[in-house]
Image: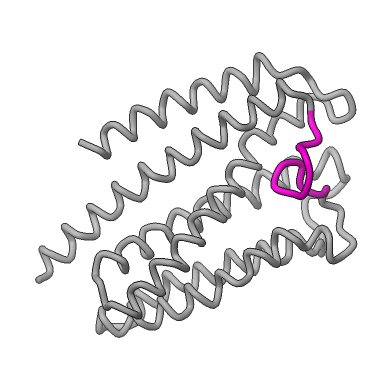
Amino acid sequence: MLTAVLGWLAALALALGLVLGLLVAPREITQGNVQRIMYVHVPSVWVAYLAFGVVFVASIAYLWKRAAGADRVAHASAEIGVVFTGITIASGAIWGKPTCGTWCSCDARLTSGEILFVMYVGYLLVRTMIDDPERGARYAAVLGIVAALDVPLVHFSVYWWRTLHQPPSIVKPGPATMPGVILVALLVNFVAFTILYLYFVTKRVGLLRAQQEATA
C-alpha cells in the first residue's frame, strides 16, 4: 500500500516539476534553454547524496545489530544511488558541453564523482562475488561506510580546488543565489526526486525480502 502511494505521489510530483521546469521557469539569460537540464541534474545529485547517506547509516546499523532489514535498506539504497550518480554524471556532461566547451575533463568535481560511482559499483559487486551472503553483507557494509566519506569531498571540491564546475546555488552558506521562480521549480523537483527515491527503496527492499525468504 505504501509503495503504491509513493509511486503515485512521485508521478504527480515529477509531472509538476517537469511543467515548472520546462514551461513556467524563465529561460536563463546566459546559458539559454540548456540550463533547464538543471532540473534533472541537481535533484539527481541530491538523491545520490541521500542514498549514500542512508547506506552509511544502515551499514553501521547492520554491523552493530546484524539486522537483516538494515542490510536490505543499505543494499537497495546503494543500487539507487549508483543509478542517480550515473544520471548526474551523464546530465552534467550534456550540460557541460555547450557551457564549458567539453563533455568531460579532469575536473575535481567530476573526478571525485566518478570515484564515488566506481566505489559503489564495487559495493554491489562485492555482494555478488562472495558466496556467503552474511559475509558479503559485512564486507559490503564496511565498503559502504568508507565510500560514503567521498560524498563531502564531491560536494566541497568546488571550494577546495579550481574547477570548471560552478559552486552550489542552494546547499551552501547563505541564501540561494537564483530567481524565486527558478528556485521554486528546482525545489519542487527536489521533492519529486526524493519521493521517487523513497518509492524505489520501498519497492526494492520488498523484492530483496521476498528473494531472501524464497532462498531460505
Main secondary structure of the magenta stretch: loop
Q: Determine the residue positioned at 82% across, 51% down.
A: 165
| Residue 137 drawn at (x, y percent) | 33, 77
Q: Which residues are magenta?
A: 166-178
The quarter of the image holding the C terminus is: bottom left
Quadrant in the rendering for residue 139: bottom left
| Residue 148 drawn at (x, y percent) | 55, 69
Q: Determine the residue positioned at 69% across, 29% down.
A: 183
Q: Determine the residue positioned at 89% across, 28% down.
A: 30
Q: Determine the residue positioned at 23% across, 52% down.
A: 206
The quarter of the image holding the N terminus is: top left
Q: Is residue 216 left or right of residue 122?
A: left
The residue most toward the front is: 174
Q: Is residue 70 left or right of residue 206?
A: right
Q: Is residue 62 left or right of residue 193?
A: left
- Residue 207 vertical position relative to residue 1 in the rendered view, above or below: below
* 41 magenta-colored: no
Which of these two is toward me, 119 or 45? 45
Quadrant in the rendering for residue 133: bottom left
Query: What's the coloring here?
Result: one colour
